Amino acid sequence: TTDDPQKAAELVESVGREELLRRAIVAAAPHSDRGVVYAGLSLGASLAQTVALGDGRARGLLLLHGTADLPADASAPDLPAQLHIADPDPFEPHDWQTAWYLGMRRAGVDLEVFRYPGAGHLYTDPELPDHDAEAAERTLAIALDFLADIDAAGE
């Protein structure tokens, strides 16, 4: 792992996105039959999104600091999902976010987006210069409520 975006890109390139996705699927597969809430941070968010949209038993999707490309035929009717993202985010420009949002809605995802003005890309990590304590606290509170709602709906 690394907290440097350039080193992260190099790591992804050296391992390969397909291999990272394969690893995410292998890690989630033993738990999928129970219904998983997929979650991820930055690159991990893109992997969580891809795996969740491919898992018909997914119970939810929680994305922090990142999204992923969507296949044109993506379908996840009524999948509850949240995105928490800096505004602006250098890795998720507004045009990209708009196209992504529309694609997720076309896929049937029940999506909420929370933007945090002035926060840095990885604003939830207190050890990084991007950290924004207020935005991180709000993100945690909203995300915990989201997870509690999913849990309550599953009972």
Image (spheres, helix red, strand yellow):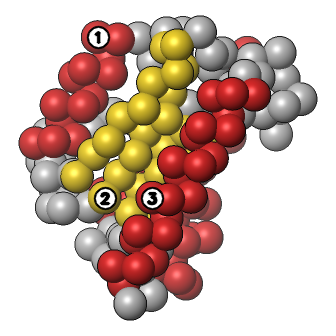
Which one is in front in this view, the residue at disc 1 or the one at disc 3?
A: 3
In which quadrant will I find the C terminus? bottom left
Residue 95 marker: 1
Residue 118 place in picture, x, y as percent: 59, 9
Disc 3: which residue: 146
Q: How many angstroms separate mark 1 from mark 2 (CA)?
A: 23 Å
Pick whichever of labels 1 and 3 is earlier in the sequence.
1
Q: Does the rendering let one see residue 86?
A: yes
Q: Residue at x 27, y 29 (%)?
A: 100
Q: Amino acid at mark 2?
A: Pro
Q: How many angstroms separate mark 1 from mark 3 (CA)?
A: 26 Å
- Quadrant of res 55: bottom left
Residue 74 place in picture, x, y as percent: 18, 50
Q: Between residues 123 and 51, which one lies in front from this camera angle?
A: 123
**Circle 2 — which element?**
strand
Residue 113 place in picture, x, y as percent: 36, 35
Q: Residue at x 51, y 48 (%)?
A: 142
Which one is in front in this view, the residue at disc 3 or the one at disc 2?
A: 3
Is disc 3 in contact with disc 2, using a CB cutoff of under 8 Å? yes
Disc 2: which residue: 80
Which one is in front in this view, the residue at disc 1 or the one at disc 2?
A: 2
Q: Does the rendering let one see residue 9?
A: no
Q: Between residues 70 and 127, which one lies in front from this camera angle?
A: 127
Q: Between residues 103 and 30, which one lies in front from this camera angle?
A: 103
Residue 28 place in picture, x, y as percent: 54, 72
